[in-house]
Amino acid sequence: TFVNLSLNLPPTKSSADINECLDAFFAPSVIPVSEDRGLLRSSRILDTPPVLCIQVQRVQFDMAKMRAFKINSHLRLRSQISLTRFTRSDHHSGNTRLAELRQKLSDIDQRLRTLDLPTTDGSGNVLDALERAQTFMSGVGQWTQLDAAQQLLADLEPQYTPESTIQCAQAISAQLESLSSILNDSKRQWDLERAETVSEIDSIYETVVVDSMAYTLHAVFIHSGMTPEFGHYWVYIRDYDRGQGKVRWLKFNDSYVTVVDDESEIFNKDSGDAAANPYYLMYVRSLDADRVVDLGV
């Protein structure tokens, strides 16, 4: 069995879900053994501890600069998680569906990133460039209506009459408009598909059957600081207060202990301090919570 997991954050994303990090930890990987051959490595769970500790690997080492650095990207936490999909005996369709949705989301994000690539002049993406080009071609047509412009064309290149120049500008503008329409319509469709895919993934993560593989979040350790060399620490602890008949979260910050009024401060809301983020989590097996946690009564 095990008591601790070390989870990495996605290196190219500004925000991630704790379940996404778990999926990445247990995802199969290929170990190369020769130039044309590799072995598939995967991890499966046989048994789980009553208390699961998760280390969020925010501190990494830059080999080029030879120094440690901290990843301050946002991590969305869940009040409950399930490890069922990582067990050897798991064959339910939800796991397969989750993999399909993850691949679909990756494909959509790749397309959206391509649309957002900067143009050669660095002044925006391709959609911005198309809009500027259409404005430019419209300006060319208007320019040819000026008397001075018509005289200049006649003096330089007699074959470029105002009529032919306008026709050329209109033809180019029509092609640009068609391409812009196709790309914008595609972007709207991909944005819609992405939202629907994220919603379905979220629904799978939210559906937690309370069994031996279900865990409830009990403590969240926070580090505030842009680098690993310095900072401030505090912890949120879930208070199982049976005497009051409710559950609440307490914030332990030095000598101050306060009640957390808005739980989104812990689970999915940015605190306003970009460098304040969870680096260590403690989950308690849901079925064992009464036995292993001080209820405060």
Image (spheres, rainbow, N blue to C red):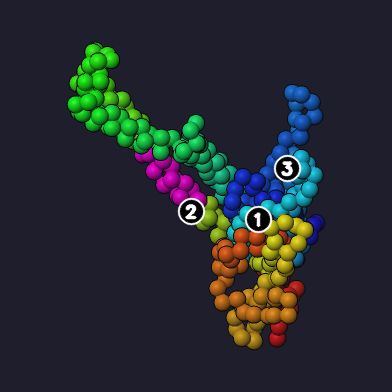
Quadrant for residue 78, please give it: bottom right
Residue 235, visible in the rendered structure:
yes
Q: State which quarter of the image contains the N terminus.
A: bottom right
**First in residue order: circle 1 vs circle 2:** 1
Q: Residues within 10 Å of mark 3 (few under 14, many from 20)?
A: few
Q: In x, y percent, where is residue 86?
A: 68, 51
The residue labelled by disc 1 is 72
The residue labelled by disc 3 is 42
The residue labelled by disc 2 is 199
At a point 64% along the width and 47% down the height, the residue shown is 10
Q: State which quarter of the image contains the C terminus.
A: bottom right
Q: Is residue 188 magenta?
A: yes
Which region is colored magenta? Answer: 182-198
Whole-Å distance between the Cαs marked 3 and 1?
Answer: 28 Å
Type of amino acid at the residue the image marks with label 3:
Ser
- In the visual, does 222 lie left or right of 137? right
**Secondary structure found at label 3:** loop
